[in-house]
Image (spheres, rainbow, N blue to C red):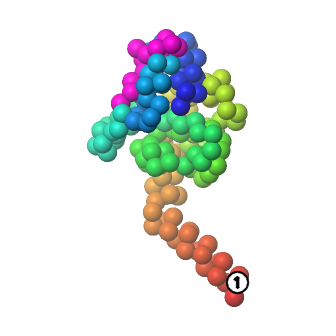
Amino acid sequence: MDSILRAFAVVSEEIQDAVLVVASDGSQSEDLARLAEKLGIADRTGFTGYIEDDDKRALMANSYLYVQFPMSDGVTRSMMEAMSSGLPLVSSNVGETPVLVENERNGLLVEGSTPKSLAEALLPLLKNTELRNDMSRESREMAMKEHERSQFFRKFMSTVQEVVDASS
């Protein structure tokens, strides 16, 4: 999470009205708040703690994009919620993240694990409304068509059947 704060510090130098909302109640919250202060972005960084589903939907409806930057295992429930809310997704290219994020279709996969590489991915997406809107539309469409539960279940069952057939 500190990489996101550091990337946001770079982003906020170019986009002065940018705001970062950290929707988490993890054990690092106090350290992250101190880091935001140290980086000079505390006045543009909100730490919400845990958010109830209705509040989360409202927050996502008023957001430009969803960012996560894990070092491993990139698929999360909140990423799927952001996708179905029609948010472009930005994430490090780790683990199973490419299952949900198709680079330059519904979001951006960041190669490298530095705040600079994340900032370089965020800036064009934040500055280019058309690009952001295109990715937003794709994100929602993919969530509804490709990752809808019954479709996912059919794909899963097809894979199971292939394994059973191959072992027979």
Name the residue located 51 percent from the left edge and 52 percent from the top edge: 142
> At which x and y percent is residue 67?
52, 35
**Nearest the eye: 65 or 30:** 30
Provide the residue designation for mark 1: 167
Name the residue located 55 percent from the left edge and 49 percent from the top edge: 75
Q: Is residue 52 left or right of residue 46?
A: left
Can residue 98 be seen here? The reply is no
**Nearest the eye: 3 or 160:** 3
> At which x and y percent is residue 148?
46, 59
Q: Is residue 53 left or right of residue 29?
A: left
**Type of amino acid at the residue the image marks with label 1:** Ser
At mark 1, the secondary structure is helix
116 vs 57: above or below: above
151 vs 38: above or below: below
How many numbered markers are drawn?
A: 1
14 vs 70: above or below: above
**Nearest the eye: 160 or 35:** 35
**Nearest the eye: 130 or 82:** 82
Q: Write down the quadrant of residue 61 in the picture.
A: top left
Name the residue located 48 percent from the left edge and 52 percent from the top edge: 143
Crowding at dot 1, Cα within 10 Å, few <14 / some 14-19 / many 20+, comes out as: few
Q: Quadrant of the C terminus?
A: bottom right
> At which x and y percent is residue 36?
48, 18
Can residue 163 be seen here? The reply is yes
57 vs 48: above or below: below
What are the residue bounds of the magenta stretch?
36-48
Q: Is residue 162 left or right of residue 137?
A: right
Name the residue located 65 percent from the left edge and 23 percent from the top edge: 116
> At which x and y percent is residue 136?
49, 39
Determine if the magenta segment contains residue 153: no
